[in-house]
Amino acid sequence: MHKKLYIPVALLLLLTIGLELLSIHLSQKLASDSVMVKKIQSNIAKLDEENHILNSKVLSQTSFEVISQKASLLGYVEGPSYISLRKPYLTYNQ
């Protein structure tokens, strides 16, 4: 009767060792994935901050005052106060 129990006990022992090794491997993989996720989240935060900075720069460069100043530096002057489809609002001074 002892010989009949030897195979199932050995099989259960090997299965237990195999599952424990699998558990250790998966825990290590999960930990390394966690480190990667933190790095990616850090990069996302940096890019989000850069995006906000660039958005504010774009908004400041495209404001009407800045565009008006750049246009006057290029020689454009303000046209008449009324709007007409036949005459342009801005004209070029030479």
Image (spheres, rainbow, N blue to C red):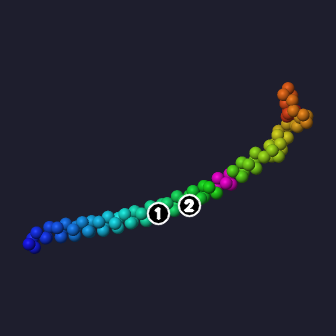
Give the image location of residue 24, x and y in percent.
35, 67
Give the camera-side residue of 81 and 91.
81
Question: Which residue is painted at 59% across and 59% down in the image?
Answer: 45
* Circle 2/circle 1 CB separation < 8 Å: no
Give the image location of residue 50, x and y in percent.
64, 55
Q: Is residue 61 magenta?
A: no
Residue 7 has which mark? none
Give the image location of residue 4, x and y in percent.
10, 69
Q: Quadrant of residue 76?
A: top right
* Above or below for 87 versus 77: above
* Above or below for 51 versus 24: above
Question: Which residue is painted at 72% across and 51% down in the image?
Answer: 57
Circle 2 residue: 42
The disc labelled 1 sits on which kind of residue? Ser
Q: Quadrant of residue 73?
A: top right
Magenta residues, start to end: 50-54
* Above or below for 66 versus 31: above
Q: Is residue 53 magenta?
A: yes
* Above or below for 72 versus 36: above
Question: Which residue is painted at 76% across and 45% down in the image?
Answer: 62
Answer yes or no: is residue 8 visible.
Answer: yes
Give the image location of residue 20, x and y in percent.
30, 68
Gap in angstroms between the C-alphas marked 2 and 1: 12 Å
Apparent side of residue 82 relative to residue 10 in the rendered image (left or right): right
Going from N to C along the chain, the mark reached first, 2 or 1, is: 1
Circle 1 residue: 34
Neighbor class of circle 1 (other Cα within 10 Å; few <14, some 14-19, many 20+) is few
